[in-house]
Image (tube, rainbow, N blue to C red):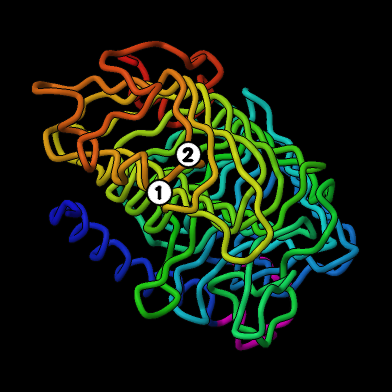
Amino acid sequence: MKNIQMRFRSMLAFMFFVSLSVAFTSCDKDDDDNNNDNNQSTGNEVIGSNITENTTWTSDKVYQLGGRISVESGATLTIEPGTIIKGEAGTGSNSTALLIARGAKLMAEGTPNAPIIFTSVADEITPQDVADGNFGSPNLDPDIDGLWGGVIVLGSAPISASNDGGDVTEVQIEGIPTSDPNGLYGGNDAADNSGKLKYISIRHGGSNIGAGNEINGLTFGGVGNGTVAENIEVVANQDDGIEWFGGTVNVKNVVSWNVYDDALDADQSWGGSVDNFVIITPDGHNFELDGPEGTYEDGYTIKNGIVVANSDSRSSGHLIDYDANTITDLKNISIRNIKQGQVIDIAPEDAPDVTFDEVYLDIPSGNLSDYITGGTVPAGVKEGKQDFTDITVFNWTWAFQYGELSNL
């Protein structure tokens, strides 16, 4: 169950910043909704149209997303280290997001001393804060969610999907209208390259796009293993922290903190890996691991991670949730702060292609079998606590600066 007090605070903040964002941007949009403009109220450079040619965003400015902004096929968006991107408030078709279309590239290479930060216009963080080494928000708590959308990266790598007519090799990513061709993903190029994402923090996102459907902090749809994705932090997103829809991209060094749905979510036979990660108190499951949705099958590996399942104010759902047809290897994972009632939610005999290797549950009491649906403990699941994760690589994150990683 979601923490009611936090959700109420988030809702009040969201309502306030919707009106604030409208006040900031309505004059610019009345003048010319299709052109970038310099917003006199915020001082930010407002991005109001899709990116169709090679473009660079520099760290001396704050870039304000005025809606769903797509980097279209053939174009490359380069974002310099230390750059701040802020999304305006909005829901439904007005939700803000940065979408990297299939055939486009995002070259967003931050550094440990100058991460790239995606956040809300409500966030008062400035380029000077980042230059001074202060990477956290000066005014928003790290549990305020849903103030803008998120980052979506799409590619041409294989996916496992189908419709009434059988297998399909491409589909529309969730949250993007079918009328927008920039939302298509999938193909047959496992080595597809959507660019580089390094030292990126995505915060306060996940605005509702309709019928309880929110945007993930970071979405990968059919993204290939030619893409570099490492040192990624997602904080306080209303939906999942990171979700993969097929593809083959490998991701290294991940923090998913205070998200309101699943910390890590995999669908459509993603064929990559996550290596070295920390998950801290999602409201949904720590892992939502689904299997193929068509005849194409591939599997993924999740390894070298620490999971904090509960805190004084927040509690995750299932420790691990997966389907009978899920194909995944879970290796060197230590799940801590477990409470009674939290389980690995499927009997191992019902999911033959899920394997466990050195997965530790630091249970408070009782038998290990009490924390497994059906009571049969999978081979490779053990009681206790181990350290598999290199925490030192996360000293650039807001979670580190806030002290959330100090006791791991």
- Would you identify the image quadrant in which residue 316 lies? top left
Residue at 74% of width from left, 64% of height from top? 186
In the visual, does 145 lie left or right of 187?
left
Q: Residues within 10 Å of mark 2 (few under 14, many from 20)?
A: many
In the visual, does 271 lie left or right of 312?
right
Q: Is residue 70 above or below residue 395?
A: below
Q: Position of residue 120 (x, y in %)?
A: 47, 56
**396 vs 264, nearest the viewer:** 264
The magenta segment is 27-39
- The amino acid type, in three-letter code, at marker 1 is Tyr
Secondary structure under the numbered disc 1 in the rendered image:
strand
In the visual, does 37 lie left or right of 190?
left
Q: Position of residue 241 (x, y in %)?
A: 46, 48
**266 vs 254, nearest the viewer:** 266
Q: Position of residue 138 (x, y in %)?
A: 39, 39
**Residue located beneath label 1 in the image:** 322
**Residue located beneath label 2 in the image:** 354
Q: What number of labels is visible?
A: 2
Pair 1/2: label in front: 2
In magenta stretch: residue 37? yes
Residue at 28% of width from left, 61% of height from top? 13
Residue at 60% of width from left, 71% of height from top? 66
Q: Is residue 123 visible?
A: no
Q: Is residue 200 visible?
A: yes
- Would you identify the image quadrant in which residue 114 lies? top right
**88 vs 394, nearest the viewer:** 394
Q: Position of residue 207 (x, y in %)?
A: 42, 66
- The amino acid type, in three-letter code, at marker 2 is Val
